[in-house]
Image (cartoon, rainbow, N blue to C red):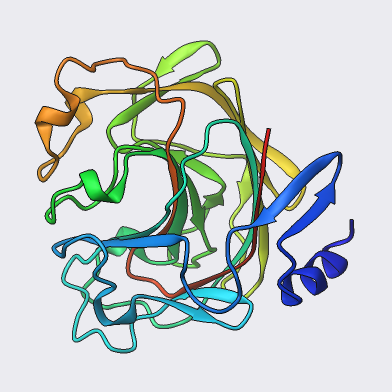
Amino acid sequence: MKLKQFAILSCLVLTQISLANETFTSLYNGNDLSGWTVKVHGHPTGDNFAGTFKAQGDRIVVDYTDYPRFNNRFAHLYTNKTYQNFHLILEYRFLSGFMSDAPSYAKLNSGVMFVSQSPESMPPQQNWPVSVEMQFLADDPANPGRTTGNMCSPGTDVVYNNKLFTEHCLRSSYPAVPAGKWVKAELIVKDGVVKQIINGQTVLEYKNPTINIGKLIKGYNASLFKNKQSQRLTRGHIALQSEGHPIEFRNIMIAEL
């Protein structure tokens, strides 16, 4: 199916389409954030502080218009449903308006988390969920050489090239796209194998996300992860990220495999 056709179907808010023998369901109803739960760092689960996440027509927008300042309010919008084997498709584009007090690494930076713990299991002061992230970056002339479709691993490790990869992020092979341009991202998770795709090109493959207790940072409820070192993460929530730079998401579709 061509991208133009796909966008038209999304605007009509169809709940299901078939693509390459997979049945995709929209994760966004085109009206509100039903089916999703917000968690903002420093705030209780469900508090969508200052309208961080907004439903605007055919897209979900990360917006800081009503923020007095960022104040490390990293946030995520979680699916209420959990997923194990799936094919996720979405489009994203970065807007202008980076929060000046956000960390410099957050500029033109966002992503989608998966195999994630639930927002209800996170204390207010936990900023990222234990999960794996398909990271989205936009091109930044002040920071040349960026790639998008990277992997980052808050509280987790993965196996890459048949070796345990314990660093926080793994670069993809796809150059970051300038802000303002729509980028199509796909994430396929099947039986522990993860494939990340940008604009139709496979940019990264790895497998078997596991918990790494040593990478848990301040704010986590440690009792939830006691004696779970190296436990595989096979099912969890999917979450859109807010890190201090405005971004839009549209055509958010998933097929369970």
Q: Is residue 17 above or below residue 196?
A: below
**Residue at 12% in and 54% down:** 125
| Res. 195 visible in picture | no
Observer-nearest residue: 18 or 140? 18
Report the side of 196 relative to 119 (left or right). right
Q: Position of residue 248 (x, y in %)?
A: 53, 72
Q: Is residue 20 above or below residue 48?
A: above
Q: Position of residue 219 (x, y in %)?
A: 11, 45
Q: Is residue 130 above or below residue 163?
A: below
Residue 20 occupies quadrant: top right
**Residue at 59% in and 20% down:** 191
Observer-nearest residue: 1 or 38? 38
Quadrant the C terminus occupies: top right
Observer-nearest residue: 179 or 113? 113
**Residue at 62% in and 37% down:** 86
Q: Position of residue 202 (x, y in %)?
A: 71, 38
Report the side of 137 relative to 220 (left or right). right
Q: Position of residue 64 (x, y in %)?
A: 33, 81
Observer-nearest residue: 183 or 248? 248
Q: Is residue 201 above or below residue 230?
A: below
